[in-house]
């Protein structure tokens, strides 16, 4: 089975949207080169997201994201600058509920929602593995560090018998 990563990041209301989008694209490139499927397949930028929402496509976008997060091997959240109302927290909730391992990338000052922050690095048996990578999304080495964390949460492929 081909591993897949859903990369979630805020497309509205953040100061560093260009830096975050660059890290997302770097991760997409790195993971695809390793044989991964990266979701969502289409990256939506802020003006397009707002226009689609106004045109009534918001529900379809939400349904697609929930379905893809629930079926992903790993959820990656690029949380720098994500507001309390960001949809990345909905995607995090879906991942926790469905048992999808999660990597949260955020700078030191980024506050995470209580339940997600509590799930990070916990040993509470029913929760999926969740890791926080503290990183500045403006630094090029961030992509490599995050890719390592993603791979570390992926179970090794089973050999055919």
Image (cartoon, rainbow, N blue to C red):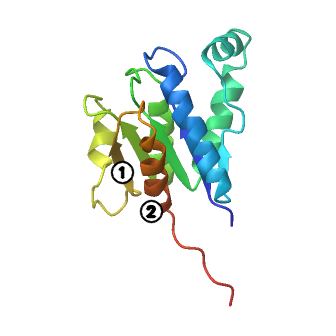
Identify the element where label 1 is drawn.
strand
Q: Give the side of residue 23 with respect to residue 33, left or right.
A: left
Q: Give the side of residue 154 with respect to residue 121, left or right.
A: right
Find residue 16 and report its image quarter. top left
Q: Is the residue marked by circle 1 packed among few (<14), some (14-19), or many (20+) residues within 10 Å?
A: many
Residue drawn at x 26%, y 34% is 108
Q: Is the residue marked by circle 2 packed among few (<14), some (14-19), or many (20+) residues within 10 Å?
A: few
Q: Front-most of 53 and 36?
A: 36
Find residue 148 and report its image quarter. bottom left
Q: Point out the frontmost of discs 1 and 2.
A: 2
Q: Is residue 84 visible?
A: yes
Identify the element where label 2 is drawn.
helix
- Does residue 64 lie above or below 3 as drawn? above
Residue drawn at x 37%, y 22% is 84
For the N terminus, the quadrant is bottom right
Q: Which residue is label 1 attached to?
A: 131
Say the numbered circle drawn on residue 114.
Answer: none
Q: Which residue is label 2 attached to?
A: 152
Label 1 to label 2: alpha-carbon separation? 10 Å
Q: Position of residue 49 (x, y in %)?
A: 65, 17
Q: Front-most of 139 and 96?
A: 139
Is mark 1 in CB contact (under 8 Å) with mark 2? yes
Q: Position of residue 7 (x, y in %)?
A: 56, 40
- Does residue 48 lie above or below 65 as drawn? above
Residue drawn at x 71%, y 39% is 41
């Amino acid at each position: 089975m081909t591993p897949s990563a859903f990369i979630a990041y805020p497309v509205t209301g953040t100061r560093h949207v260009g830096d975050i989008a660059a890290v997302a694209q770097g991760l997409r490139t790195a993971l695809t080169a390793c044989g991964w499927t990266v979701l969502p397949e289409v990256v939506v930028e802020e003006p397009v997201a707002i226009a689609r929402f106004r045109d009534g496509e918001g529900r379809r976008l939400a349904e697609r994201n929930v379905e893809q997060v629930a079926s992903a091997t790993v959820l990656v959240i690029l949380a720098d600058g994500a507001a309390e109302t960001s949809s990345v927290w909905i995607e995090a909730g879906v991942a926790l509920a469905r048992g999808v391992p999660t990597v949260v990338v955020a700078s030191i000052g980024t506050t995470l929602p209580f339940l997600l922050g509590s799930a990070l690095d916990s040993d509470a048996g029913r929760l999926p593995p969740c890791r926080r990578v503290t990183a500045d999304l403006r630094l090029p080495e961030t992509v490599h560090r995050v890719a390592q964390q993603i791979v570390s949460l992926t179970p090794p492929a089973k050999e055919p018998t």
